[in-house]
Amino acid sequence: MDIFLRHFSEKSRVEQTWLSELFCSVRDRLLPVLSEGMVVDEVALAVVSRLQGCFSVDSLPLSFRCVCVSELFSRQRSPCFSSLAMSTSQHRELIRETEQALPSHRALPRANLLLIGCLSTGMEGWRVSDSSGSVHCELLYPDPLWINQPMLFPSWNFIPINTPGKVGQEAGYLELIASPIHLTPDAVTFDPGGSLPESLGVKEAVRRMREKRPGKELLCVNGEVCAVSPLLVIAGKRFFSFSLRERDYTVPILVMDSRYVFWRSCVCVGRRVCVRALRVCSLRGWVGQRVLSVTPQSRLLAPALPDQQPGTTALVDEVETDQSVPHSPQESCTDIQTAHTDAQASCADVETNAAQREECASGASSATHAACAVKIKHSKIISYKGVITAVTDQEAGLYVIDGKVGLCLAYQPLRWNSGLRPGAEVELQHVHFLFRPSPHCLPTMLCACLRTSVRVTAFSLVAPDSSAPSSSHDALPRFLLERNLGVSEYLWLHYYSTALQQRLCPRWVCEARVCVVASRLLECVCVCEQDRKPRDIYREMLKEPHLCPLSEYRVCGVGCEVPSISKLCEWLTEECWSSLSLSSLLPASAVALTRAELNPLLSWSFRTWSVQEQPKLALLMGMLESSPSAATLQLRDRTGALDCVLVESTAEAGSQRPADNTAWLGCLVCIRRCTLVAERFLKSNFPSWKHLKEEKYITNKHCRVYVQVCVSDLHILSPSTAMSLLLQERENQPMREKATNEERRSEPGRRESEGAREEMTAEEGPSQPGCGTSEGEKKNPIKERASEDSRGGAREKDTAEGGKRSGKRMREEEEEECSSGRDGMEQAEKSGGGDSKRQKTGAQVNSTAATEPGLMGREAGPTSDPCVSLTVCVETKQGVALRNQQLSSGATPGLSLSFVATVTCLGRAQGWESDPRNSPLQEREYETPHTQLDLQFISSAVRWFPLLHPGSVYRLVALHTEDVAVFSVKTERFKGGVKSHGNPSLVVQPRWRVHTLAISPLTTQISPSQAQNIKTISQVLQNSSCPDIVSFYGIISQRIMLAEEQGKAPVIPSLIKDKDVCVETDLRFRLTVEDAEASGQSIQVYLDLSHNPFIPGLISGATVVLHSFHRSVSRKGNVYCRFLPVSCVTVTGLGSADSDSARHCLPPPMMLLGEWVRPEERQRCMLGRLKVHVTCVLHLKMQWTCSLCGSIYKQSGCSRTFPSCDSSSAVFQAEAKVAAEDGTGEAHVWFLSEMVPTLLLLGATEWEGLQWRVRVRGLVRVYARGWDMVSDMNAEDPLVRYLCMLCSSSSVCRELNVTCQLRAQKQEAPQMRRMKRGEREFLSKFPSPLQLTCTHTSPLPHTL
Ligand SMILES: [Zn+2]
Ligand SMILES: [Zn+2]
């Protein structure tokens, strides 16, 4: 050291201390890694002289501290930038510029660190090493001659990688901004080693390669680099390829020797290089293709670029003048614009072709894939240079360049982290340009394939975004390779992985599993190509003309959206109001309706949408859960919840029943086929129909949206534990495949071509009626998935290298032989083969039911926690309502949702070592005689309501207890001294679970319940011996809101406000329910749901079972039903607007008056067609009515005087009653308002004129007296005379074809009438004539 310091004897004491520290550093850190013969003093002196060379002045950088590699890792926790040459003001200016260009980023903080080391090579490329360790480094234009040379690094960034949980990964890397400076001047000599063969041009090399037998002679080739592949890792073996070009000739060179991996950064496109000692070899599986491959003697000569001379470039210059990469044809943004138009033009070219293919495809897979319209486009290959402005998702390989161009590196299977940060300048050679490959990315996308060289040409000066949340999307590139995804599908997958993470994590799915769920969703949405060829890496890298998975891309249509629940609800709400046309809700007679009649007609309406017909929707996705506050099933995600009416098809074709399987709770499902329903509730105050356009008369409006779905249309993305058990149980059953063949065929999204899958389906057992016919279909996807997952897991353990895995898969189909580097490839082959075998047999991995470890938020997996159970069969259940309940002792009694289910206990309570869940019923659980029990579900326990149905068998499980007494019942036979005849009752605790049990031989022994006495409508109508309380089923044909009861104060709202219960206030309506078996029979049912949670699904076309309704008979003898507090409404079949219109297409039956008058016919048929003769007009009334108060309205205003009415709107009402007969009987037919002009044969203008004349008088009434028409008014009034004449004219008294409805009428005794025939008089009984209302007239067929 003294010799060294002697050179600086004139320096100050501080400088001397600094120099001695430098000396120690060189001695301890650098010297041990240098070759023999280096003298420490010389090296230290060289360092000082190079340092002084960096500065123009002869001073020492005293503010800099020597740092070694291990110190960087251990102490430098944040990214930093170090530069010897840059002054403080220069640095400040640089920061300002950088932060201006990227406003959301901060520049790297400066650290004054002095780094001296030796450049060496490693597995990934270049490294900086000293005696304390080595660190990966990125260089811009390295020279192969730098290897093993001591260097001073004048300017660099250090980027630490603090990935929690990723142990073993290096903790950072260096970006060498300026070229390193040699410390030994004589090091630039080159020893080629052995004799030098002549250097060939590319053309000559190509000729020789054709001639030579592989592996005989070593060639030396020089030329310009035209393509560089990414570094691939296959079975731990690293390799890459590059091509040299000379005019039209190219020669591919494979670098299979991992010692030469560092060449990759030396061979950049456009650089001239010379490669020595290459061997000619051929690729197996690619006949005739020969390539050059490196040998252990190979050397690369890459002359340094003119402005990249080591040690001469000052940093600032470099940063600013680095635009000078030669030979690279660069696309500016204007070029991109032209590329746009080209791309669009080429799209148009291929579209017809694509359309044809699409037809073929859709023909094969029918309408099941209608969700995704596919369009094929061709990509264009370009070169591009730009600055990375954002990292969309590093793990998924997605970036943004220049703020407007997307970059996808996912097809290059390796880690992409080095240097690709915001602010870095990148050069892309041979990159695919895609235009609008997906709606979920920027319109312009650049996608890199195995041919693309991605090169950082200037390192970023901003700090990496440490705040960016970890996306756990590292599995995505793996899916890309495993499933052979197209780029559109990949971008879709990435978008929805992020979306699902936001919607489901962490409550339902853990972050690590999001990608798996997203990929299953992708399978449901997109037609993943079955015929896509497996990737062949060598062809992709080397073959001319270039062909790779990115050459052609399929653009998924916009219909691939999977909206979040809240988005869906928003959309539904919006659509529901925008599609509302008030006038369409009104009948033709609306013009004559007063305010009181009009507004109730507007107060409720509904609209349905079929999801598969929506262009913007692919499917719905969410967790199936049950809501304790609404007592309904819901489809949920973190954004919201949507009520769900779930039914399942029964064995009987076309018929449905409510879903009863609790295993569905906790399943993550997606739904392609379903009906979305919006019910609109409107409070309005329209004076008359003329004011319908004026919004101000709407006082309140809201809507209820929900989804109606059949179990067979649910696709499980992730099963609940109980569902997994159920599916496993099915699998263990013996083969009974024939029965399910039909069902399986109908499953959408099935991949018919998969052999393995076919095998599996053949083993599947028939589906269980207890759990819905369709669940059998679900088994296979799940099974497949379970196996996929286990494989995925295994792979992850297998290796930490993403590229390794992907490489394996890529190698599945291709085998190659390359004389050099053969050992490595053999290994790769084995591994690839093994992998493919695993792929094929993977489907046999046994457990479907393996609980998915990542799914959370549901019951824990099987444990040895003891529990007790009770098995019951439900006999009847009440409806859920707010009832006064005394909950646990001490709690204050109050309103809470509750219901009671009467059940038959199949046996005594049983103890279990672990939760039996829904495992099959065991012998010990079944014991006769059975006893009856009332189960009380209170408060949060009402969540079981939607899945508890009479006739189904359930296991009630109390967890964490061994005490069977929890199910012991209070037998309160004597309640307050009164003997109770009711069943003993048991309160279901909120923490108990209910599991639906599949039908088994044991449960079929249970005799069909007598209590469940469900009648048809006809039985309710006709059987006078019917009990007062009836249960019946039918199809809803009409729903009408009942007018608000004036002056009735709502009692409930204040009480329920804080209960968080979903009650529709003042929901009173009338349902017209038709007989499901016999047409024409219908009953009116009055419901008052103001104490009950809203019941979705009560729309026309829906089949409902109405339990425990009160049967009443009106004064006029009509049978109707009323809702009771214990009544329960269950939707058993789904309705829709379509079914509504379909039902009303059928014309009513043709009737004869003589038949219709009979009581049984009157019960049977409400609406009929008649051909009648009008004998006379009995009366005709025309009136202007005040639409607000209903009084007569004259020209000047409302005639009401006390209190006076200042209404300004009036409606015209007309009513005519005629006597009609058809030869078999007589009837009185009423014609109301809009039917009157038809009866009187008046045209529109005549009718209008008549209305104006009536307006002066307010009311005109004429009626028959004897054979004449008379009026109470002045008989000379011309209007009266005209009407009297008209009514008795033969044009009115004529034949008519009418459709009539029975009017409610009292059953009267037949009239006695005196008849005269000739001389004789008879006294004869005539039944009172039928009272009918004409709803429609049709012209008579023209007869001569
Ligand atoms: Zn390509
Ligand atoms: Zn009035």
Image (cartoon, rainbow, N blue to C red):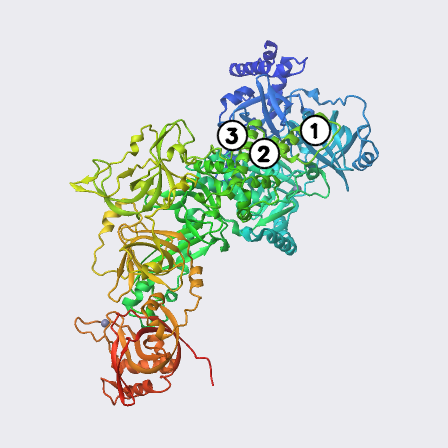
Rendered view: 654 above or below 495: below
In the rendering, at what x and y percent does residue 558 appear? Answer: 53, 52
* Residue type beneath disc 2: Gly
**Looking at the image, is mark 2 or mark 1 nearer the viewer?**
2
First reached walking from the N terminus: tag 2 or tag 1:
1
* Residue type beneath disc 3: Thr
Q: Nearer the viewer, residue 832 or 498?
A: 832
Q: Is residue 533 left or right of residue 663?
A: right
Q: Is mark 3 within 8 Å of ligand 1?
A: no
Alpha carbon distance from label 2 to label 3: 62 Å
Quarter of the image where ligand 1 sits: top right
Residue for badge 2:
842
In the rendering, at what x and y percent does residue 1005 appear? Answer: 40, 41
Q: Is residue 914 left or right of residue 83?
A: left
Residue for badge 3:
88
Alpha carbon distance from label 3 to label 1: 46 Å
* Residue type beneath disc 1: Met
Q: Is mark 2 within 8 Å of ligand 1?
A: no
- Identity of the residue drawn at 45% across and 63% down: 1142
In the rendering, at what x and y percent does residue 1253 appear? Answer: 30, 83
Residue for badge 1:
256
First reached walking from the N terminus: tag 3 or tag 1:
3
Q: Are marks 2 and 1 in contact (CB under 8 Å)?
A: no
- In the picture as drawn, the residue positioned furthest to the front comes out as 1320
Rendered view: 348 above or below 773: below
Rendered view: 600 above or below 1191: above
- Identity of the residue drawn at 64% across and 40% down: 449
